[in-house]
Structures are given as structure tokens and as C-alpha cells.
Amino acid sequence: MPLIIRDTLFPEVKIISGTRFRDERGFFVEKYNEKEYLELGIPRFVQDNMSESSLGVIRGMHWQIDPEAQGKLVTCLSGSILDIILDVRKDSSTFGTSVALDLTSDNDDCVWIPSGFAHGFQALSDSTRVHYKVTNFWSKECERSINPLDNDLKLPWKDLTPIISHKDAEALSISQIFNDTL
């Protein structure tokens, strides 16, 4: 079953959808096909993660650097999220630019986020479940975070009372991390 690929502002970041087949039992959709993903240039995944969040929770902005850089394939399994991808490749012409996507359990979209991009999302419903496959294992030494509420980023979070972890609240701003290059 062929995947449907849509581009984003960043040529490397792709929205990927399967074809939904419905009948009296419900529906079926193929979300991941290793052969097709490898043909798209997306590497193999080594780990699957899932989170559950309540309305307003913001998780992010996170990424990993070499040698443990991660690509992520993100899907919303229940509820809905505002998914934000931020270019943190310092030499990129789009450094510091973000793209926001709506991912819901009602659409069959997932988003491929290669290494070099920070990722975060905001839960837009209660009991929102997000599943993401990653191309490398988590590494404390290689993990990086930007405070998701950093005013310099101008991220388009929804007007909900934000709930963020202590770790994310204590994260540095993008200008502190990248020495005022914005």
C-alpha cells in the first residue's frame, strides 16, 4: 500500500500518511513499512516510545547531537497535538525557523523529523497519546533541550495554560545555547 508523502517548509521533514481502508469492522491503515521508508532515505528505527499527556501539556523542545543524533517518526494515537519542529542546524539557512503541524488520531499523518531538528508538541485534548519511533537510543550526554516557552522562538503554542516539566522550564533559550546567533 503506497504511502502518501507531503513536503513541509523543511525539505528533510516529511508528513507521511497511509491509505485508510474502511469496512463494517472499522478501518485499517498501514502506518509503517520499512521497505518504503528505506526507499525514502529514512533509516531504520531502534526504539519505540509513547507518552500520554493532558490538555495543555507541552513536551519539548528536544533533540540529540552526534554521535547519538536521533531521527523521529511521530504519530498521535489518541487526541490531538500541535507538533512543532525547529531547525537547530546552526549553518542552515532556516536555522531558528519552525513549522507547526496538527496531528490527530483522526488523520493518518505521521511526521518524519531527521536529526538536526528540535521537536516538541502541545496536547490539545485530555489523554493525548503520542507514539514515536527513533533511529538512535537516548543518550543523556547527547541530549539537548531549549525552553519551549523561549520568547525568541515565537513558537505558535495554542492559548492554553502551559504545563511543562521542571527540566524543560529550566532549559536554556536558543540564543544562550547557540551564543546569540539568532
Image (cartoon, rainbow, N blue to C red):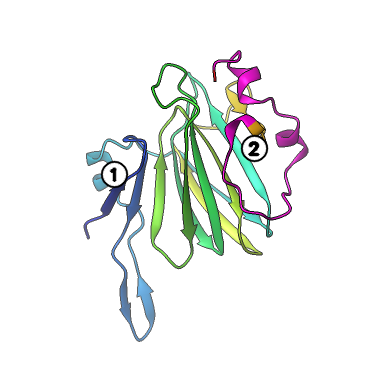
Q: Looking at the picture, how far across and down is residue 22, in whole percent?
A: 32, 78
Q: Nearer the viewer, mark 2 or mark 1?
A: 2
Farthest-out residue, right: 166
**Near-viewer residue (28 or 110):** 110
Are the residues at dot 2 and dot 1 in contact (C-beta closer than 8 Å)?
no
Q: Quadrant of the C terminus?
A: top right
Looking at the image, residue 97 sits to the left or right of residue 172; the answer is left
Q: Residue 8 at x, y = what percent? A: 35, 43
Q: Is residue 95 depicted above or below 167 in this figure?
A: above
Badge 1 amino acid: Tyr
Question: What residue is disc 2 on?
Answer: 148
Magenta span dominant secondary structure: loop
Taking the magenta stretch, the answer to whether it contains residue 162 is: yes
Residue at point 27% right, 39% down? 38
Residue 102 versus residue 22 in the image, above or below: above
User: Disc count in the image?
Assistant: 2
* Mark 1, residue position: 37
